[in-house]
Amino acid sequence: MTEILQFAILFLTPVISSLPIALAWIYKPGEEWARKLPYLSVFGLFVSLVISLNILFNFEEGFYSYPWIEDFNINFVFVVDYLSKYMGVLTALIAFLIGVYGLEYMKDDYRLGWYWFFFNTFTASMLLVVYSDNLFTLLIGWEGLGIASWGLIGHWFRDDDDITFVGEKGRKVGPLEMSWSPSFGGWRAISTIRFGDMPMLFAIAAIYALTGSLDIHAIPWEDLFVKIGLVGTVILLFLFLLGPFTKSAQLPFSEWLMTAMTGPTTVSALLHSATMVAAGTYLFMRLTWYIKPWEAHVPGLEAIYLLVLFLGLFSALYGASVALGLRERKVLLAASTMSSLGLMFASSAASFWVGEIAVIVAFWYLIVHAFAKASLFLVAGHLIHATHDRFCSGNLVFSRKMKVAFAVTIVATISLAGIPPFTAYWVKSGMDGVMEHLMEEGLSLPFYLLVLVSVIYSAFLAKFLSLNFIKGEYPHHEHTEGGGLMKLAYSAMVSMLIVLLAIILLQREEHAAHFLEEGYLKMSLYVGLLVTASYFITLYKPTSKLKIGVIFTDRMYLPFLNDFIVPKIGWGIAAIVDALNRAIDFFFHTAIPGFFDRLSIAIRSIQSGYLKSYVKIVAASIMLFLVIFSLVGW
Amino acid sequence: MTESLLMAAIIILTLGAIFSLKDHRIGFAASVVSILLAFASLTSETYFFGFFVIAIGVLNLITLFISENQIKGIDYAITAMLIFATILVIQTENFAVLIGTFVLVSVPTYILVMLSDREAKLDVGIKYITFMVFATIIFIIGAFLVVYFYKEMNPSIYIIGYVLLVLGLGLEVGIAPLHEWVPDVFSAADPIPISIIASIAKIVPFIVAFKILIATTNPVTYSITMFAAFLAVLSMFTGNIGALTSRELGRVLGYSTVANMGYILATFVAIVKPEFIYLAISGALLQLFANSAGKIGFFTAIKKEGVSAPFTYTLALSFIGIPPLMGFWSKLFITLALVYSGYVWLAVLLVINSAISVPYYIRLARELGKGWGYGIANIVGLIAVLITVITFYPPDWFVQSVKFIIETFGVAL
């Protein structure tokens, strides 16, 4: 019972603690005292962090349930297992640190009530997704993520500041202007996510209808798949995974993540790199954890895992290539996030052939990526503040004034790139091992794709470092004073990478030994050296005039899908509806009244007023009827 | 007892008519007393019927106060004769008396139709009388043929009789395709006398026809019934569609009458279903009463150039058939009777016709409704509205009373 109470506090505190600022801003927006209330919101995040740590260290692994709609077998069921206990702490910790950062970053904003309410609602929703075993409560959190994402991306809804836009104003490719506003970004995010959420909802409903249960651990997955057969399994899982695919911005649903960069940087750091977009991959890992595809022998399952494997790898390659071509600080990082999410999907999917360890590798990569990418985003936000420019700029003279940011970027990039012996190297080595294992199954392409992605990934991280601190232009605008809280937040964030490295090297975790073992393999070392070379070459020469770069900058023209083809389909549907609408209007407003008008006039036309004609009509009618009935009878 | 009450009523009516030459109010008072005496002659089963007839009759008499016509004083007695005939027709099973009541509601209207505040409307009178005489004759011929040949099992003559009777009825009350006089007379005559013709005078012909046809039901009736259905549909559509674009309000009410007579004629299809005939007759009578109240209210409004808007809208909604107004219940009973008799298509057409009628009734209510007002026209409007809202209490009571009435609904042959 006390565990359930702690779960309730964990989910509710962030929301409740954000209500004072939300209400204050409705009634007294911009008051000086109201600008102090965000401290309370951040305190709420801190409470969640403390509880999540308590869950990690003091809770037994297992399931904690509280009755809700018992007649329908729908209950609050929360899971504490390997995935959720770490993911919960990760979410709460990153939310708290970014909350601290946001106290300074957002302090002069015009919509603090809106910002903190959605920021904290997001955190609560994410924690609900992380700890829910019941798909119904998970779905509530899942939709909370979508709403918060919409609210926060479109936070600067006035669209009045170029610094909040994505793309270059006035730059046209064909009929498209490559520029997107915050309000547009918010709308695109929610509409894309809904596109995936609807099929996912149907899939969950189907699972419930077929098994009578919504608790992930209790659903008899293998029986379910056998029952619905190959085609049924493929359809059900595909519909279900459309939710994670859109949430995690996999191809072809990636554009919303790029235009989501119109939101405040804190939002990009928390939602659109570390946690919310990772929720898609996390849900896939959680399902895989309980489906145990490496044990189940169901034909449809292999097809789905193969799809996820390659979708993830190609999304990773796409995201990395695009990141290479981008010069906007945040959009570059967004593309790289998409790439990382692709790798997480791919590695988790490989578990079908490799086993549970593939999921653990993917999960570790999720953790490392979250801290590193959040650090980079927070630095990017500080840089945007300092230079008032969303494009990369900065050289060694500038970086002397931003020493902490410079240092944090160095640590974050080398830790994330996979350069030996830093944090991601060991995890990436595990991933190399997983993909290598696939070669034995006759799948050699995934390994080569992974190596290619790793090399490109390392290159754009170096590019980010170089263009912002070493070889970029000197910023046109400079405002490097202050920023104490921001520095504190990203320093703390990046230090977590060191902690993770220590955990691996000192083998303080059950799977650390596996990573060390993989890291000492020759093949891993070769890949690590390749990645290192790529990093340093790009650091030395961060720009290129190759034509292919323009294609990458334009995101391989994928915006055409979202901004041209989909709207054309939409307008097509609108045209059909409009035509039907006109037809209905014509029928009811013109055709029917016109018909009755004419008929009415025709009926009244016999009223000539002459008695003689009336007598003729009446006499003729009577005679006619009499003749008919006399001759024919009835 | 009954006979002496009726005799007393006639004597008072006659004396009242004579003394009304001195003061027309004597005529009014004598007419009211006379019809109350006639009402007293009714048996308890027919009280509800009698109540509605008296209410409508008194309303007719009140409206005559507004009219300054050529025979001021006598007009009350003439109208009272119509009411008297309507009270009589429900009680009698005598074929000769039935024919007599038919003539009694027909002939006095020849005079009424020509009355006016200025000079007598001779052209209207000629047009009206021509068709009424025609109607009375073929109705009576039809009635004789039906009564004397149904027993002989001579289907041909029975069918001719049925057709003549229905056509005579149709010409008398204004059913298409014999309705040509109705829009012309309704728009050209003075609104007050025409409101009497459009209300109380419509009841007797239907009851006479019902009684004769019920009494003479035979196997041939099953098939010839279709003829009544055909005329009913023709009349509904002609009336409702004709009214849609008519500009003159009197003409709109004329077409409305054609449509309403169609609804009532439709109930003739239930004659061959004895188990549902009470529903058909309940619906027909309520439809006649609702039509009467509405017509009196609207014609009075035309005469006085408008009455209070809530009255006109209530009457319009009753005509359209909105619950719980009387027009709803009447159409409901008619529809049920049609469905139970196997004429679902006819019921559907009736409902469609109710929908078609919506625009012109709302138009009537809008053009004749003028805010709030006082005066005799508004009293008439108020009473008419009270008659239509009496069914706020679901009129099962009326249906039950009709179940008793139809036990004596026929002709002693």
Image: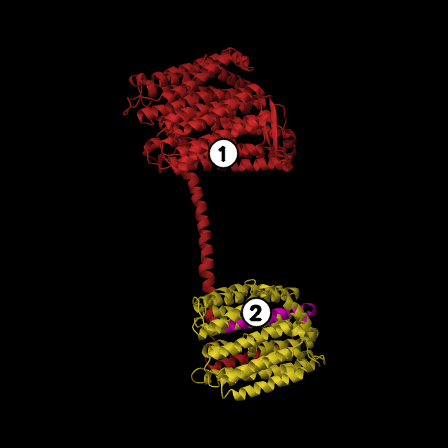
Chain colours: A red, B yellow
Secondary structure state at the residue bearing disc 2: helix
Q: Chain of mark 1?
A: A
Q: Is residue B31 above or below residue A538?
A: below
Q: How many marks?
A: 2
Would you say residue B296 sits in the magenta stretch? Answer: yes
- How far across and down, in percent of the image, does residue A494 sit? 43, 18
Quarter of the image with the N terminus of chain B in it: bottom right
- How far across and down, in percent of the image, does residue A285 sit? 55, 25
Disc assigned to residue B233: 2
Amino acid type at circle 1 is: Gly
Label 2 crowd bin: few (<14), some (14–19), many (20+), radius 10 Å: many
Q: Quadrant of residue B342?
A: bottom right
Q: Is residue B368 above or below residue A109?
A: below
Determine the residue located farthest toward the left in the rendered image.
A476
- How far across and down, in percent of the image, does residue A441 sit? 57, 20
Q: Quadrant of residue A82?
A: top right
Q: Name the foreground residue: A522 vs B162.
A: B162
Q: Name the foreground residue: A341 vs B261.
A: B261
- Residue numbers of the magenta segment: B272-297
Q: Is residue A166 visible?
A: no
- Mark 2–mark 1 Cα distance, whole angstroms, equals 61 Å
Q: Chain of mark 2?
A: B
Would you say residue A493 sits in the magenta stretch? Answer: no
Amino acid type at circle 2 is: Val
Q: Name the foreground residue: B296 vs A13.
A: A13
Q: Is residue B338 left or right of residue A104?
A: right
Q: Is residue B372 visible?
A: yes
Residue ID for mark 1:
A144
Quarter of the image with the C terminus of chain B in it: bottom right
Disc assigned to residue A201: none
Label 1 crowd bin: few (<14), some (14–19), many (20+), radius 10 Å: many
